[in-house]
Amino acid sequence: MSQEQDEKLIKRLHNSDTQRDAFAELVKEYSELLYWQIRKIVLSHDDANDVLQNTFIKIWTSIDSFRGDSKLSTWLYRIAVNESITFLNKQRAQNNVSIDDTDTYLVSKLEGDEYFDGDEAQLKLQKAILTLPEKQRIVFNLKYFDEMKYEEMSTVLDTSVGALKASYHHAVKKIEEYLSTEH
């Protein structure tokens, strides 16, 4: 969506007479983008759908608090990322998985996901990404796959550009190291 279209949509979202239709348009326009962002974090198709629903519920209940200080898509990404992290934290607690064992847990979910249709190289890359700490994994995904600019990422993740560049650099080094060894 263009900036002009977003601005019109935001005005309609803040008007009680047009809010429902505008929200339906927002869901239609952003569902796929948000789904894939969430999927990169939680990995499972079913979990991604659940988190996407929670994301849209959160967007609906907090639409009045959106002031337009950032792009609409940036605000939506931020909610989706936060909902994904909340979901993973709940899963860790429910399954009694320590933070150190998260990558093993997520790899097993990825390997068992009937919707994952990648080849061996893609699976190896995903496994490498899963060895990263959660924040580095999110930064890597946003930069590498979504080609998001550091400035926008800074708003989404509420982190400085310098810290994001460092996180991405460390993530790339760890992934290269992982891929250069036999797994």
Image (cartoon, rainbow, N blue to C red):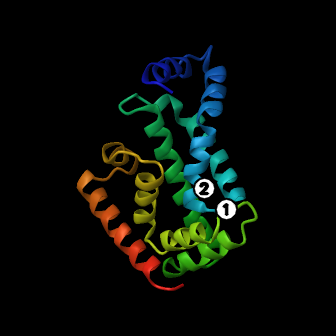
The residue wearing badge 1 is 44
At x 65% / y 31%, what residue is drawn? 28
At x 43% / y 39%, what residue is drawn? 74
Image marks 2 and 1: residues in contact by CB distance under 8 Å: yes
- The quarter holding residue 91 reads bottom right
Q: Circle 1 — which element?
A: loop
Q: Residue furthest bottom?
A: 182
- The x, y position of residue 67, in whole percent, is 40, 28
The type of residue carrying mark 2 is Arg
- The x, y position of residue 88, in whole percent, is 57, 64
Q: Which of 82 and 147 is in front in this view?
A: 147
Q: In this view, does 157 lie to the left or right of 81?
A: left
At x 32% / y 69%, what residue is drawn? 170
Q: Nearer the viewer, residue 94 or 39?
A: 39
- The x, y position of residue 27, in whole percent, is 64, 33
- The x, y position of residue 1, in whole percent, is 51, 27
How much space separates mark 2 and mark 1, taking CA atoms? Answer: 6 Å
Q: In this view, does 72 lie to the left or right of 107?
A: left
Q: Few, some or many C-alpha atoms within 10 Å of disc 2 (few <14, some 14-19, many ≥20)?
A: some
Q: Which of marks 2 and 1 is nearer the N terminus?
A: 2
Above or below residue 98? Residue 84 is: above
At x 53% / y 21%, what residue is drawn? 9
Q: In this view, does 163 lie to the left or right of 62?
A: left
The type of residue carrying mark 1 is Ser
Q: Few, some or many C-alpha atoms within 10 Å of disc 1 (few <14, some 14-19, many ≥20)?
A: many
The residue wearing badge 2 is 39
